[in-house]
Image: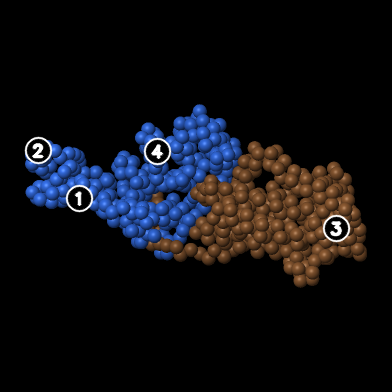
């Protein structure tokens, strides 16, 4: 090997034996601001399709809310919620709205980080193209994660606006719900990216939705209070990211501060950090990087 | 997999890497892009070293991969804009370059068309224009003309020759020997991860092959090739129903073939394809 500085003529030189000796996929994430143009790319595509996609994203959750909230609400009446200052009676629609907004954040983030990210990564090979430019895979995964969270908070904001319009809650503490819901979007983006890294095709995501997200919706106190569940199931439920999200957001709809806020927030943060790392490692493995 | 491979590229030079499927062409390119790390040895480019300085090197590289990775949701101009941003270029800077790049790719009239509306050749040229957005010194092209019709290939070659004249270096992999012969100053023949030959196309042919080839096919051709005519060529190869005579003295052989009117003969100079087949064998490589 000669020093390139001493050898002016050849511009580029390769002396190599291979191969496949790669650094550990579990090495620390190398993140930088190079994620930003990747995020902007997704934003530019989405800007062209924003209105139709927004209608799709908010119409369904709102139909559920209105049908169940007012329909079931008439049957159920009030629901007892354990608050920081003892039990509180709230109308069913308020109970449902405060839970389903978390569910919407979860679903919007999951859809984007699964179906859309997979299209870009696997079908369109957009990621491969980006990696030929000076952008690391780590930054692409970060960009996709933040992008899915952005789309989620965009959907959530629209739904929140409709909820305010319907007069479901007028709590000023909803302002605090907004950053929490952004966090919920981030957590579920990270989780979904693990399955994105493992997927061979779109069908795989059906498992994630039916075997993981749907049961979690029923175990997270969105449609009925968790207190109704047997203790063993409740212990499981308490560990789920969505139930912790609901525990943070629901009191804010009732103009109260959540009890044990830090514990719930830490659970979400832990899920986000650990799953981002796993997602990154598995994506590196997929790309043999 | 590659084993003990070494090469260099000088400014303004086009280095072709040829070899059968699985020979290590793609691995070589992946190493040059820092997408995998060699066990030993070093990769220097533009005064920097892979993989430590991968991003700094890629900032000065242009890459056209085998498969188009164009953004289907963007127009040609937007594809260039978005790609330029990955290099940290400012929008104003990129927008200034877009008309030149589109013109270079003969896509000015398609500035607002999406890749889905382009022909195969146009897509490849857009990929090439995209690879030039950062004004790279070194281009890495992985089978840039595979799947194109002759017109589109010739236009692509013309553009690549123009880039070489501008002093850019090109590292090119190809399965087309006429492409290698036309574009490359030097060739690297890889097989089973090893470099088995290196040199200019003409030197390689002169070094490894007899100057003339006579191809013979038709009923009884193989028997003739193995029998009386065998001695008239320095080397005879049989592939399927065709016999290939490699010789420095074709006249004598052609003379004797006059007696066999029913056979079809083709007399031509030895070319890179002969070299390639001689060095890497005629068997099909479908495992990779």
- Marked residue nearer the N-terminal end (4 or 2): 4
Provide the secondary structure element on which disc 1 rests: strand
Residue most toward the front?
Answer: A75
Q: Colour of chain A?
A: brown
The secondary element bearing badge 3 is classed as helix
Q: Secondary structure at mark 4?
A: loop
Question: Which residue in the protein does label 4 denote?
Answer: B148
> How many C-alpha atoms fall within 10 Å of the one at disc 1: few (<14), some, or many (≥20)?
some
Label 4 in the same subunit as label 1: yes
Mark 1 sits on what residue?
B238
Q: How far is the residue under mark 2 from the one under mark 3?
A: 100 Å
Counting from the top left corner in percent of width and height, residue A144 is at: 62, 51
Q: Are marks 3 and 4 on the same chain?
A: no
**Are callouts 4 and 2 both on one chain?**
yes
The residue that disc 3 covers is A251
Which residue lies at the image location 61% right of the left edge and 59% below the top edge?
A194
Mark 4 or 1, which is nearer the eye? 1
Nearer the observer, disc 2 or disc 3? 2
Q: Earlier in the sequence, mark 2 or mark 1?
A: 1
Chain ID for label 4? B
């Amino acid at each position: 090997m000669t020093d390139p500085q001493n050898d002016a003529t050849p511009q580029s030189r390769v002396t190599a034996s291979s191969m496949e000796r790669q650094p550990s996929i579990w090495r620390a994430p190398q993140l930088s601001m190079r994620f930003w143009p990747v995020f902007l790319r997704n934003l530019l595509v989405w800007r062209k399709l924003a209105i139709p996609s927004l209608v799709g994203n908010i119409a369904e959750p709102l139909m559920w809310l209105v049908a169940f909230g007012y329909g079931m609400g008439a049957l159920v009446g009030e629901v007892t919620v354990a608050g920081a200052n003892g039990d509180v009676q709230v109308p069913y629609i308020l109970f449902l709205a405060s839970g389903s907004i978390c569910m919407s954040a979860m679903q919007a983030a999951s859809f984007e980080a699964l179906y859309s990210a997979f299209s870009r990564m696997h079908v369109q090979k957009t990621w491969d193209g980006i990696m030929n430019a000076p952008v690391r895979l780590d930054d692409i995964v970060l960009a996709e994660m933040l992008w899915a969270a952005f789309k989620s908070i965009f959907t959530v904001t629209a739904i929140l606006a409709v909820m305010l319009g319907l007069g479901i809650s007028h709590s000023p503490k909803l302002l605090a719900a907004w950053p929490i819901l952004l966090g919920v979007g981030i957590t579920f983006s990270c989780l979904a990216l693990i399955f994105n890294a493992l997927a061979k095709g779109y069908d795989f995501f059906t498992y994630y939705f039916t075997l993981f997200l749907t049961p979690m919706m029923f175990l997270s106190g969105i449609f009925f209070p968790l207190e109704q569940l047997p203790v063993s199931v409740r212990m499981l439920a308490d560990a789920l990211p969505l139930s912790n999200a609901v525990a943070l957001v629901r009191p804010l709809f009732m103009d109260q501060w959540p009890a044990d806020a830090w514990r719930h927030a830490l659970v979400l943060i832990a899920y986000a950090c650990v799953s981002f790392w796993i997602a990154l490692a598995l994506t590196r493995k997929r790309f043999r990087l | 997999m590659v084993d003990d491979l070494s090469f260099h590229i000088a400014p303004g030079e086009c280095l072709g890497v040829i070899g059968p499927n699985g020979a290590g062409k793609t691995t070589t390119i992946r190493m040059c892009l820092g997408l995998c790390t060699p066990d030993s040895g070093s990769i220097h480019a533009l005064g920097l070293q892979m993989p430590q300085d991968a991003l700094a090197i890629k900032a000065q590289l242009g890459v056209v991969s085998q498969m188009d990775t164009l953004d289907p949701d963007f127009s040609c101009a937007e594809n260039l804009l978005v790609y330029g941003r990955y290099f940290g270029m400012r929008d104003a800077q990129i927008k200034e370059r877009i008309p030149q790049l589109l013109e270079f790719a003969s896509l000015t009239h398609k500035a607002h068309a999406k890749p889905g509306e382009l022909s195969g050749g146009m897509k490849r040229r857009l990929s090439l224009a995209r690879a030039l957005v950062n004004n790279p010194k070194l281009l890495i092209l992985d089978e840039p003309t595979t799947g194109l019709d002759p017109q589109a290939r010739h236009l692509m070659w013309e553009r690549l020759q123009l880039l070489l004249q501008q002093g850019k270096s090109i590292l090119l992999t190809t399965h087309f020997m006429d492409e290698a012969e036309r574009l490359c100053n030097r060739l690297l023949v890889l097989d089973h991860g090893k470099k088995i030959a290196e040199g200019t196309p003409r030197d390689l042919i002169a070094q490894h092959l007899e100057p003339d080839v006579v191809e013979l096919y038709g009923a009884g051709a193989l028997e003739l090739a193995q029998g009386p005519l065998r001695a008239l060529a320095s080397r005879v190869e049989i592939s399927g129903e065709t016999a290939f005579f490699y010789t420095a003295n074709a006249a004598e052989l052609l003379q004797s073939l006059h007696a066999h009117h029913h056979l079809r003969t083709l007399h031509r100079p030895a070319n890179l394809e002969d070299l390639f087949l001689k060095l890497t064998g005629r068997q099909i490589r479908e495992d990779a």
